[in-house]
Image: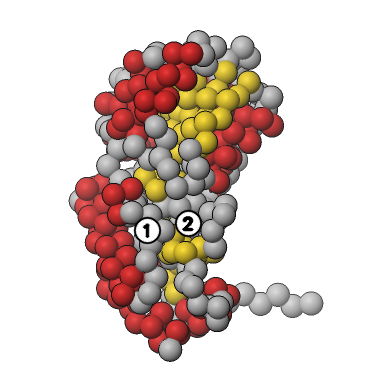
Amino acid sequence: LRLTMVIEDENPYLLLTPGPLSTTPTVKRVMMRDWCTWDDDYNVDVVQVIRKQLVELAGGTTDTHTAVLMQGSGTFSVESVIGSVIPEDGKLLVLANGAYGQRLAKIAQRLKITLVIEDSGDLAPPDPVKLARTLADDPAITHVALVHGETTTGMLNPLEAIAPVVKAARRVLIVDAMCTFGGVPLDVAQLGIDFVISSANKCIQGVPGFGFIVAERTALEATAGWARSLSLDLYDQWQAMESGNGGKWRYTSPTHTVRAFAQALKELEEEGGIAGRHARYTESQRVLSEGMAELGFPGLLPQEVQSPIITAFPFPDDPDFKFKHLYEELKARGFVIYPGKVTDRDTFRIGTIGNVNADDIRRLLAAIKEARS
Ligand SMILES: *Cc1c(COP(=O)(O)O)cnc(C)c1O
C-alpha cells in the first residue's frame, strides 16, 4: 500500500458554507511550522495575545472580562459552558428557534440539567415580552441561553432587546454567537452577556480545531468546581491559562490552528475590524439575495431579520428542481453551497462568510444561471 499525498495551494472551489470556510492563503501558510507548548514564544506570544484580542473584540477590557480557549469544534465550547457554569441546583431556560438553539437544550438534557425550552419556531425570533413574563413567573430559572445568529435559517436574533430583560431579572446570560462573533457588531460587555461562545473557523476566518469563550470575570470566578466534565471544565481551563506566564492549555493544544487563528485576527484588524468585515459580508449578502430573487429564488426570511452570514432559500415550485443536481453543477464550477436544515420546509443555504466577496457572489449567480438553463 502506498499513500500518496497531494499538496494543493489553490482550493478547487470556494466554500459558501457556515464553516469551515474558505481561508486566505496567508492563514494557511502560517501553519507550516511546529510549536513547543512549553515555550513562551507560543504561550505568551501567541495564546495570550489571542486571548487579549478576543476580549477587545467583545468590547471588554481584561479587568472585567477574560477569554478561555477550548479544544474541539464549536459545540465542545458550548458544552463546556453549559456543563461548567450552571450549578447543580440551577435551572436553564433555552430560547430556541432552530437546530442550534435545540442543540443548547440537548446538551443540557444530556447533562441532566433542569431545563425549560421556549421555542418560537424556526421563522420567529424570541419575544422579549414573553421572556420577561417567563422569568417573573419562574424564579427557579438561574440561566438563560440563546443563539445570536441561528445558522438554520440565517436569522439574527434580537439580542439587543433580549439581553436587558435577562439582566433586569438578574439571571446569567449565555450566548452562542458561533457564527456571528467577529463578523457582526456585538457589544458583549455593554449588553452584560456573561458568557459568549464562538469558534476559530467562523467569522474570524481561521481553520477548525478550537472554540473560545469570552466571560465576565466575576461570573466565571463563581463557577469553581461546578463542571460536569473533566476535559471540558471551563474554570479549570481558565485557571491553567492564567497560571504562570499564562497561555497554557491543560491538554494538547491545537498549535497549528492556534497560530493560524493569530494570523486570522491580524487580517481581521487589517480589514477594519468587525465593522469592516461586517460591511463586506453585508454587501455579499445583498448581492446574493437580490440576484437569487431575480433567478427565481426569493430568500426564506424577510431582510429585516436576515443576517449577513448565511441565507436560506426554499426549494422553488419547480417539480424538476433537484438540489443534488444544482450542488454538483455548482461544485464543478468552483462553488460549494450547503443543504438546508429548517424543520418543515425544503431549503438550501448559501454562506457569505470567509474569504469571499461580492464579486465571488456575482460569479456564483452567473454559475447558478448557467446550471439552471
Ligand atoms: C457552527 C455553529 C455551531 C458549532 O458547530 P460545530 O460543528 O460544533 O463547530 C454552534 N452554533 C452555531 C449557531 C453555529 O453556527
> Which residue is rendered at x = 44% and y = 13% of the image?
136
- Does residue 137 appear anywhere in the picture? yes
Q: Amino acid at mark 2?
A: Gly
Q: Residues within 10 Å of mark 1 (few under 14, many from 20)?
A: many
> Which residue is rendered at x = 37% and y = 58% of the image?
353
Establish whether ligand 1 lies closer than 8 Å to the Cβ of label 2. Answer: yes
Residue 183 to residue 214: above or below: below
Circle 1 is placed at which residue position?
Answer: 353
- Labels 2 and 1 touching (C-beta < 8 A): yes
Describe residue 231's horizontal placement relative to residue 240 as left or right.
Answer: right
Q: Quadrant of residue 28?
A: bottom left
Circle 2 is placed at which residue position?
Answer: 19
Secondary structure of the residue carrying numbered label 2? loop
Q: Nearer the viewer, residue 257 or 23?
A: 23
Establish whether ligand 1 lies closer than 8 Å to the Cβ of label 1. Answer: no
Describe residue 51's horizontal placement relative to residue 321 as left or right.
Answer: left
